[in-house]
Image (cartoon, rainbow, N blue to C red):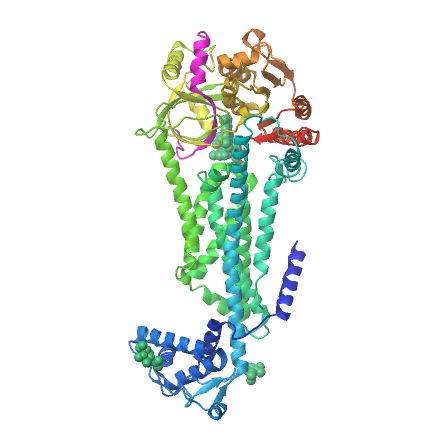
C-alpha cells in the first residue's frame, strides 16, 4: 500500500510538472497580483523613506506609473483601468486620500528605454529607484506561475475539503432514498406484499447475498479479528471508497513548477502543498467524526441505520483524519528543517498556534491508541472519560491552531461543538420528557441470584411518549456511586402486555423470583405494575456498572429496591417485523429481551399472522424459567404457542429437572447444547419458500456471526426474501 501510494505521488507530480498548462494573463486577478508582486519589494525615491510599501503604492507617482505600464502590457487595458480604480478606492479607505495623477502617456520608444526589473535585482531603501520601471517578461512570468500554482493548490484544498464532507452527504442521501423507496413500494404493494417476484427480487437478493448482509471477508463480523472488529461488507465498501477518496484528494490537484518564487525547490513545493492539503482535509473530517459518534444524530434519524453502523463510520473517519494530521505535522516539520535547521525549528515553538497544532496531533494519536478494541472492551468507562476529555482538548487546540487564519476555518471548530451540544441537549430533553417535572424516576429493581439477572421495572405513565418494541434506553442510577455513568438496555416488556397477563392468570404474578418473594415484594411490584404503565428491563451483570447494581440489590435479598434513575431514550428503531411471513429470533442469554420486546405485538396481530420461532441458548435454567413464566403469559402469546404459531426452542447446557413441564407451555421444546443455526435457518427458508422471512439475532458475537452467515447461505439456497437484523449489545 505504501509503495503504491508512493508511486502515485511520483507519477502524479511528474505528470503535473510536464503538463503544466500555463496560460498567463488568462486570469485577470492573477495578472494584477503578479504585477503587484513584481513591484512590491522595490523602493522609489519619490516616496518618503518611512512609508510602508502599501503607502508607497498609493503615493509614489513612479510606483503608480510602473504599475500602470505593467498592467497595461501584461493584462490589457480593461483590467488595468479596473485595477487602478480599485487601488484608488482602497487608498482612499486606508489613507484618506485618492491616488495622485501620474504619468500615463508613454511613447513606445520611451517604454523600450525603461529599466527592466529582474529576479535578483534589489532596490531597497538603501538604493531607491529614480525612474519608472517595468518587470522583465521572465520575472513577470515567474511571478505569474508562482501565484497560479499556489492559487491552483489552494482552490483544490478548498474543493477537496468540501469533497470529503459531500461524500457523507451523498451516503446519507443514498440511505434516505432507499428508505423512501421501501416506504413507497410498501404503499403500492400493501395488497400483495408477499409476492414480489421477478427481476427486482433477484437483484435485491443478489445484493443482499453479496453486499449488504455478509461479513467483509467470509465469516467474522461481530467477533474480533486480532484486536479489531471488521464491519459488515457494505460498510467496509463505503469506508474503503471514503479512504480512497481521501488518498486521491491528498495527492491530486497540485501544479508543481520548476521555478517558484515562494519555494526554492520543487520538493519544497510538494512538501508545503501536501502539508496544507492533509491539514485541511483532516480538519474537514471533524464535523462527521463528531456527528457519527453521537446518540442523537441527524444522519441516523434520516437514514434509519443503526448506531453501530455510524459508530464504524465514526471510527474510520477519525482514523483517516488522524493519519492526515500526522502527515500534516511531519511534512511541516521536514519543511522547516529544510528551510532553516534546528534553530529555525526551535523558533516555531515560540508561537502558540504552532504549539496548539502539535498538541492537537499528539492528542489525536493518543485518542486513537486509547480507543483500541481491547481497552474499549475491558475498561469501557475509562475509555469513555478519556475519549471525551481528549476530544475537548483536540477541539480547543485546533481552534488555537487555526487562529492565524482569522476565522477562515473556525466553522470546522463550531460544527463539531454544536453537534456535541445538540446531542447533550437532546439527552437532557429526553430525560425530561420521560418524567416531566420530576427529573428522576423511581424504579424498582431486584436481583435473582440463581437466574443471575437484574430486573428493573420503570413506570412510564408520566412519559410523553410510549416505548416501542426494540427500543433501548440509557439508564443512569442516581443512587450509584458513579451516577454519571449511563448504559444502554433494551426494553424487555411494555406494560399493557403485563396487565393483560395479570388478567389472564391471577395466580402467577410477574415476579422474577416468585418462590422466595415475600408478601411485601408482591405488593410493591403489584402496586407499581397494576396501577401504572411501566416497562421492564432484564439486565445481566458484568464487571462495572451492572456489577455494582447487582451488589446494591444483593443486599436486599429478593426484595425489590426502589432506585432513582434517569431514563434517556428511546433509541433504536422498531423493525417492521410484522410484515414478514415468518420471523426467526436467534437469541443468546440476555439477548432474549429483543425477542420478548417484539413478541406480544407480533402475536397480537391477527390478519396475515406471522409465524414466529424463538431459538434461545441460555445457561441459567432459573433465568429460562423466569422468562417463560413471567413474560410469555399474555393471552396472545399463550394462544400463539398453543396454536403452534409461536415455536419456542430452548438450548441449555443440560436437561433441566427444574423446568418441569407443568410450569412450561407444552409446546416449548428443550434441547441440550447449542443450536445448529445454519441448518435451522436453511430449513426455515425452505419452509417459507413463497413468503418472506426475517432473522433477528441478538446475543454473543459468535451466535450473531453464525446467523449472518446462515442467512447468506439461505439466500444462496434459493429463498430470495430473507432479511437479517442484528441487535448488538456491544459497539
Ligand atoms: C443497544 C444495546 C442494548 C443493550 N441491551 C441490554 C439488555 O437489555 N440487557 C443486558 O443485560 N444488556 C444489554 N446491553 C449490554 C449492556 O449495555 C452492557 O452489558 C453494560 O453496559 C455493561 O456495563 P458494565 O459497566 O457492567 O460493563 P463492563 O463489565 O465494564 O463491560 C462489559 C461489556 O459491555 C460494554 N459496555 C460497557 N458499557 C457500555 C456502554 N455504556 N455502552 C455500550 N457498551 C458498553 C463493554 O465494551 C464490554 O464489552 C445492551 C447494549 C447495547 C449496546
Ligand atoms: C480617484 O478617484 C477619485 C474619486 O472618484 C477621482 O476623482 C480621481 O480622478 C481618481 N484618480 C485617478 C488617478 O483615477
Ligand atoms: C539569481 O541569483 C541566484 C543565486 O543567488 C543565481 O543562481 C541565479 O542565476 C540568479 N538569477 C539571475 C536571473 O541572475
Residue 697 visible, this angle = yes
| Residue 555 image offset from top left, x and y in percent | 42, 20
The percent position of residue 111, horizontal first and vertical second, equals: 47, 90
Q: Does the magenta portion include 484?
A: yes
| Residue 633 visible in the displayed image | no
Residue that extends furthest to the right in the rendered view of this protein: 717
Q: Is residue 338 magenta?
A: no
Can you tell which quarter of the image residue 693 is in? top right
- The part of the image, by quadrant, that contains residue 525 is top left
Q: Position of residue 550 (x, y in %)?
A: 46, 24
Q: Is residue 495 left or right of residue 274?
A: left
In front here: 480 or 477? 477
The relative height of residue 115 versus residue 297 in the rendered view (above or below) is below
Question: How many badges with numbers are in the image?
Answer: 0
Q: Residue at x 40, y 84 (%)?
A: 63
Of the pair 583 and 356, the residue shown nearer to us? 583
The residue shown at (42%, 82%) is: 68
Residue 402 spot, x, y in % from top left: 43, 59
From this view, report whether residue 17 is shown above or below residue 215: below
Say which of 120 and 342 sits in front: 120
Q: Which residues are magenta?
A: 480-507
Amino acid at each position: 500500500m505504501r509503495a503504491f501510494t508512493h508511486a502515485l505521488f511520483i507519477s502524479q507530480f511528474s505528470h503535473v510538472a510536464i503538463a503544466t498548462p500555463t496560460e498567463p494573463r488568462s486570469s485577470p486577478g492573477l495578472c494584477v497580483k503578479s504585477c503587484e508582486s513584481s513591484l512590491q519589494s522595490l523602493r522609489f525615491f519619490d516616496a518618503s523613506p518611512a512609508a510602508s510599501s502599501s503607502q508607497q503604492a498609493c503615493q509614489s507617482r513612479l510606483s503608480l506609473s510602473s504599475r500602470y505600464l505593467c498592467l497595461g502590457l501584461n493584462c490589457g487595458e480593461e483590467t488595468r483601468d479596473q485595477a487602478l480604480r480599485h487601488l484608488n478606492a482602497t487608498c482612499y479607505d486606508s489613507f484618506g486620500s485618492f491616488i495622485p495623477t501620474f504619468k500615463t502617456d508613454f511613447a513606445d520608444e520611451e517604454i523600450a528605454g525603461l529599466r527592466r526589473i529582474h529576479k535578483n535585482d534589489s532596490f531597497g531603501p538603501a538604493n531607491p529607484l529614480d525612474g519608472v520601471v517595468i518587470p522583465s517578461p521572465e520575472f513577470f512570468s515567474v511571478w505569474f506561475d508562482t501565484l497560479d500554482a499556489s492559487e491552483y493548490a489552494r482552490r483544490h484544498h478548498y474543493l477537496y475539503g468540501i469533497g470529503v464532507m459531500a461524500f457523507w452527504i451523498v451516503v446519507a442521501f443514498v440511505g434516505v432514498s432507499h428508505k423512501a423507496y421501501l416506504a413507497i413500494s410498501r404503499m403500492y404493494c400493501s395488497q400483495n406484499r408477499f409476492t414480489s417476484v421477478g427481476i427486482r427480487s433477484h437483484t435485491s437478493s443478489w445484493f443482499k447475498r453479496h453486499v449488504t448482509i455478509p461479513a467483509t471477508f467470509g465469516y467474522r463480523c461481530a467477533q474480533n479479528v486480532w484486536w479489531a472488529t471488521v464491519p459488515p461488507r457494505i460498510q467496509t465498501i463505503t469506508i474503503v471508497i471514503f479512504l480512497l477518496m481521501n488518498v486521491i484528494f491528498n495527492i491530486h490537484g497540485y501544479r508543481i513548477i520548476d521555478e517558484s518564487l515562494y519555494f526554492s525547490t520543487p520538493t519544497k513545493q510538494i512538501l508545503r502543498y501536501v502539508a496544507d492539503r492533509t491539514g485541511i482535509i483532516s480538519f474537514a473530517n471533524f464535523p462527521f467524526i463528531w456527528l457519527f459518534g453521537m446518540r442523537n444524530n441527524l444522519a441516523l434519524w434520516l437514514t434509519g441505520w443503526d448506531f453501530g453502523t455510524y459508530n464504524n463510520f465514526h471510527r474510520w473517519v477519525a482514523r483517516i483524519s488522524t493519519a492526515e494530521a500526522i502527515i500534516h505535522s511531519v511534512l511541516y516539520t521536514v519543511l522547516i528543517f529544510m528551510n532553516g535547521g534546528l534553530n529555525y525549528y526551535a523558533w516555531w515553538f515560540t508561537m502558540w498556534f504552532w504549539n496548539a497544532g502539535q498538541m492537537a496531533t499528539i492528542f489525536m494519536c493518543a485518542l486513537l491508541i486509547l480507543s483500541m478494541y481491547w481497552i474499549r472492551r475491558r475498561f469501557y468507562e475509562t475509555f469513555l472519560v478519556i475519549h471525551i476529555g481528549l476530544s475537548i482538548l483536540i477541539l480547543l487546540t485546533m481552534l488555537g491552531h487555526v487562529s492565524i487564519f482569522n476565522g477562515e476555518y473556525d466553522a470546522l471548530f463550531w460544527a463539531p461543538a454544536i453537534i456535541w451540544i445538540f446531542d447533550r441537549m437532546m439527552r437532557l430533553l429526553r430525560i425530561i420528557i420521560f418524567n416531566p417535572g420530576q427529573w428522576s424516576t423511581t424504579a424498582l429493581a431486584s436481583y435473582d441470584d440463581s437466574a443471575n439477572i437484574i430486573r428493573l421495572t420503570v413506570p412510564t405513565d408520566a412519559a410523553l411518549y410510549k416505548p416501542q418494541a426494540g427500543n433501548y434506553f440509557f439508564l443512569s442510577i442516581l443512587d450509584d456511586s458513579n451516577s454519571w455513568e449511563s448504559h444502554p438496555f433494551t426494553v424487555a416488556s411494555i406494560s399493557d402486555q403485563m396487565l393483560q397477563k395479570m388478567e389472564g392468570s391471577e395466580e402467577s404474578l410477574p415476579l422474577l423470583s416468585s418462590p422466595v418473594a415475600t408478601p411485601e415484594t408482591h405488593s410493591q411490584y403489584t402496586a407499581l405494575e397494576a396501577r401504572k404503565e411501566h416497562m421492564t428491563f432484564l439486565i445481566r451483570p458484568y464487571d462495572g456498572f451492572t456489577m455494582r447494581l447487582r451488589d446494591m440489590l444483593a443486599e436486599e435479598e429478593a426484595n425489590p429496591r426502589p432506585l432513582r434513575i434517569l431514563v434517556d431514550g428511546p433509541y433504536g428503531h422498531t423493525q417492521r417485523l410484522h410484515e414478514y411471513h415468518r420471523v426467526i429470533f436467534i437469541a443468546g442469554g440476555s439477548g432474549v429481551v429483543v425477542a420478548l420486546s417484539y413478541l406480544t405485538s407480533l402475536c397480537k396481530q391477527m390478519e396475515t399472522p406471522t409465524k414466529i420461532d424463538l431459538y434461545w441458548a441460555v445457561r441459567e435454567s432459573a433465568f429460562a424459567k423466569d422468562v417463560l413464566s413471567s413474560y410469555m403469559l399474555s393471552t396472545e402469546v399463550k394462544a400463539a404457542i398453543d396454536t403452534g404459531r409461536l415455536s419456542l426452542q430452548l438450548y441449555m447446557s443440560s436437561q433441566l429437572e427444574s423446568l418441569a413441564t407443568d410450569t412450561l407451555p407444552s409446546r416449548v421444546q428443550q434441547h441440550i447444547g447449542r443450536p445448529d443455526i445454519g441448518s435451522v435457518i436453511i430449513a426455515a427458508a425452505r419452509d417459507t419458500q413463497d413468503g418472506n422471512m426475517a432473522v433477528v439475532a441478538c446475543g454473543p458475537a459468535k451466535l450473531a456471526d453464525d446467523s449472518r452467515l446462515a442467512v447468506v447461505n439461505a439466500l444462496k439456497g434459493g429463498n430470495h426474501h430473507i432479511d437479517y437484523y442484528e441487535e448488538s449489545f456491544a459497539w
